[in-house]
Amino acid sequence: MKINKFIAVFLTTYFTAQAVFPQAAVSAYINEAQSEEKSSGMLNNAQLAMSRADYLVTPGDIYSLAYAAGSNAIQYTISVDTTYKVRVSNLGILDVKGKTFLQFKQQVELLVTKNYPMSGVQFVLVTPASFKVMIKGEVKSTTEKGAWALTRLSNILNEDTLTAYSSTRDVLITSADGQKNKYDLFKSVRLGDQSQDPYLRPGDKIEINRCTKKVKVTGAVERPGTYELFDGENLQALITLYGNGLAPLADTSRIELYRKLDDAEKTADAGKKIYLKSADVENDYPLINYDTVFIASYSELMPIIFIEGAVKGVQTEAAASTDSVANTSKLTLTFNNGEDYAFFLRKHKHIFMPESDLKKAYVLRDGESFPMNIEPMLYDATYYSNVQIDPNDTLIIPFKQYFVTVSGAVAKPGRYPYIPDRTYDYYVGLAGGFLKEKNSGNRVTITNIAGKKLSKADFITPETNIEAKSNSFLYHFNLIAPVLTTLLSIVTTSILVYNQVK
């Protein structure tokens, strides 16, 4: 009897504990809150914020607290205002200014556990705060943009905001408490210094200053581009720091500086091209706003060969939109003096296409041409060629041209260029369509080059024959109608003559 009573008390206590333990209630509460947040797109932000150790508690954040107080399940919503003073149930008030979510969570858990040991406390961020920041200065227009606590400075500066004169290396942010800090986004992008690309906070005012020296470098440097230089930074810094150094074949004896005419800074050299050498790099030649520096490469001094025809090149948008596969390209490639065609073409095997007719290639040289079968050069490892490339040779690669024959009851029977992935009706259309007086029901016989019959749904292959059947009854009747009419006339006349004579 005592054992049964003990079991009954145990089971009652167990199920009561299960009822008041907050886990299920918290899960239901969180699921309900999350389902509501999905529609506003904030759920992912909440998950991201809780996964980041650097997420700062922000005015407007909404948190959920759940725990067990004895036999009661407590659910409590906590919102943060601009005072950063947060009341945690009836247990106390916390100052969370400057605290991360994890620090806030630890404070709450410690406070609840101190008052209610074994309470199963759970604390989550339900809705991260969103706020506006002002952007002014050298921008298209002063504006306010939306942000949240994990929005960085670079996330809201884009082409819609900045002008051609905006500086991203001298950005001033004034916080809500009046503290001013300057930031250099170049250091963040190039050097990975995230301290120069800060998270934005409520009340921030961003001021974009005007750049004073923006210079472009092209040619034989590792990182060509347009860069904003500080005062005192000139040619040497442009090449070594911003351009990340010279490319392997850079020719510093041929540096060209184009100085743009600028009303704000007119100089004697404005609008001129200035030729510099390696000594000018060492002496840190002074640069001004809008200068453009070009560094030549030794590769430009190497002899060149032109390859034209059925090769892979830059395809224009207009050519890409056409049905024709015969899209001619022209390549300009460099080679070493004394290099033969076989060795050179093996290096550039990737430029050829299935449509390239390698056996019928030919070379134009000094106004004359001579044939060159380049197929063995590309695919026969034992092939030897002693034909050397001359500077300015033009190698012509013809296209392999395939055709499809359309015959029978069509307007214009003939052979038409093959286009991949087309069915019979495309080629019948090229032939002017069916002759309705001859063809009934668009009936065709399609035979490929191997003699196999194809269906109307099959894609046509090269050298296929499409025969439009002349199966119209009226067409065949019209062919014999004149003969029948003549015969009937003869018979009728004969009968009439016979009757008259009789």
Image (cartoon, rainbow, N blue to C red):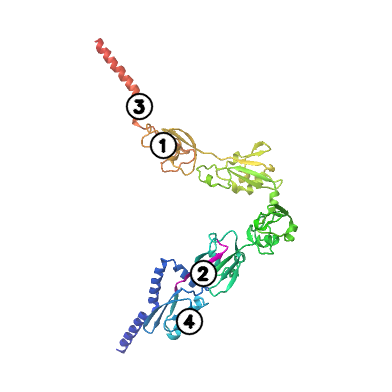
Q: Amino acid at mark 4?
A: Leu
What residue is shown with label 4?
94
Towards the viewer: 385 or 94: 94
Query: Does the magenta portion include 133?
Result: yes
What residue is shown with label 1?
445
Towards the viewer: 177 or 487: 177
Q: Is residue 1 left or right of residue 66?
A: left
Secondary structure, magenta segment, majority class? strand
Q: Earlier in the sequence, mark 1 or mark 2?
A: 2
Is 77 drawn above or below residue 165 in the view shown? below
| Furthest residue toward right | 279
Q: Start and end of the magenta stretch?
A: 125-139
Residue at x 40%, y 73% (from the top left corner): 30
Q: Which mark is residue 478?
A: 3
Query: Mark 4 or mark 1, which is nearer to you?
Result: 4
Distance Cα–Cα, label 1 vs label 2: 67 Å
Query: Mark 2 or mark 3, which is nearer to you?
Result: 2
Is 499 drawn above or below residue 53 in the view shown? above
SS state under label 2: loop
Q: Quadrant of the N terminus?
A: bottom left
What residue is shown with label 2?
150
Residue 159 seen: yes
Distance Cα–Cα, label 4 vs label 1: 87 Å
Towards the viewer: 203 or 221: 203
Query: Does the magenta portion include 100?
Result: no
Where in the figure is residue 277, as x and y percent of width and height? Answer: 74, 55
